[in-house]
Amino acid sequence: MRVFVTGASGHIASAVIPELVSAGHQVVGLARSDKAAETVIAAGATVHRGSLDDLDALREAAKGADGVIHLAFKHEAMVAGDFAGAVDADMRAIEAMADALAGTGKPFVSTSGTLLLSLAGLGRVGTEADKIAAGPRIDAENTVVALAERGVRSSVIRLPPTVHSSLDHHGYVPILIAIARDKGAAGYVGDGSNRWPAVHTVDAAHLYRLALEGAPAGSRLHAVGDEGVPFRQIAEVIGRHLDVPAVSIPAEEAAAYFDFLALFVGLDNPTSSAQTQTLLDWHPRHSGLIDDLDEGHYFTAPAGTR
């Protein structure tokens, strides 16, 4: 299968592309710069030059592919405070690729997040059956699921906030480590009992391939290994490796301490992947978040420079 991958020079793609290539697929990766193109080629894919804003390039690549995996999102814009702009760009990109795939029966695997479920106030472990009517990024998820009605074998993979491994250089874990280094303490909000799900990057990549190859149209899937790790436990492990204390941060001080992550660090987001595991015979096999942190690779160089 010829597979077009957006976000092809990013963290998740660094495992997805080798996973696809090892299974015999031909991968074409979107790259917006020479540096990104070099990364895509090194991972085993050919390059399609363009960006999320280049809608014609996205349509062209999707039309020429047997399937699409959409990993890209303007994370830099989100961190800089333009979350709305990043969300709008994502929706436009999805719609452009969807137009090229409509009526073909080809697979389109997109990406969402389990943290969105915390907005629903479930008060329990979230499942693949849970959905929200509307909202930023939620609209994109719902749009992809609805592509099943347009003749696309669409699916959405909800990633947990912590997709961890030695391949993770810029995700939430490196950011939390950088904050702890800077502040001299590893923080958590309140009593830190709120839970974050997690998954190893390689396990997530395997799920993307399984979804591409066989997810039913209109599927919501959960790439979750750890159902819910207490945030205080994450902070304590970070503190131990940095030799700094783990400390409680009052909710009213979270913005000053965690910066843009303050929106997320206090959320309780326990999430199950039981339905996904049954549906696609996907079973996480790599280390959980705490064991991965204890391997030490996150602490061998300052976060963000690895």
Image (cartoon, rainbow, N blue to C red):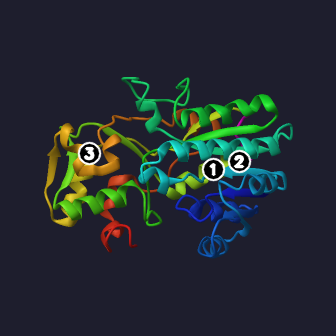
Q: Mark 3 points at which residue?
A: 255
In the rendered image, is residue 229 in sight?
Answer: no
Mark whose residue sits in front, 2 or 3: 3
Residue behind mark 2:
212
Contact check, label 1 and label 2, Cβ < 8 Å: yes
Please report whichever mark, 1 or 3, sits nearer to the chain's N-terminal start: 1
Query: In 3D space, how far apart are the residues under numbered discs 1 and 2 (Cα atoms)?
Result: 6 Å
Badge 1 amino acid: Tyr
Local SS, label 1: helix
Q: Report crowding for label 1: few under 14, some 14 to 19, many 20 or more residues within 10 A (C-alpha).
A: many
Q: In this view, does 268 lie above or below 246?
A: above
In magenta segment, residue 75: no
Q: What stretch is highlighted in magenta?
A: 213-217
Q: Residue 88 falls in which quadrant of the image?
A: top right
Q: In this view, does 283 lie to the left or right of 255?
A: right
Relative horizontal placement of residue 124, taking residue 42 as reference (left or right): left
The residue that appears at 38% across and 25% down in the rendered structure is: 124
Residue 222 % position (x, y): 53, 39
How far from the left and from the top, in percent, is residue 27? Answer: 73, 63
- Helix, strand or loop: magenta stretch: loop
* Residue 216 lies in the magenta-colored region: yes
Residue 147 visible? The answer is yes
Amino acid bearing label 2: Leu
Q: Nearer the viewer, mark 1 or mark 3?
A: 3
Earlier sequence position, callout 2 versus callout 3:
2
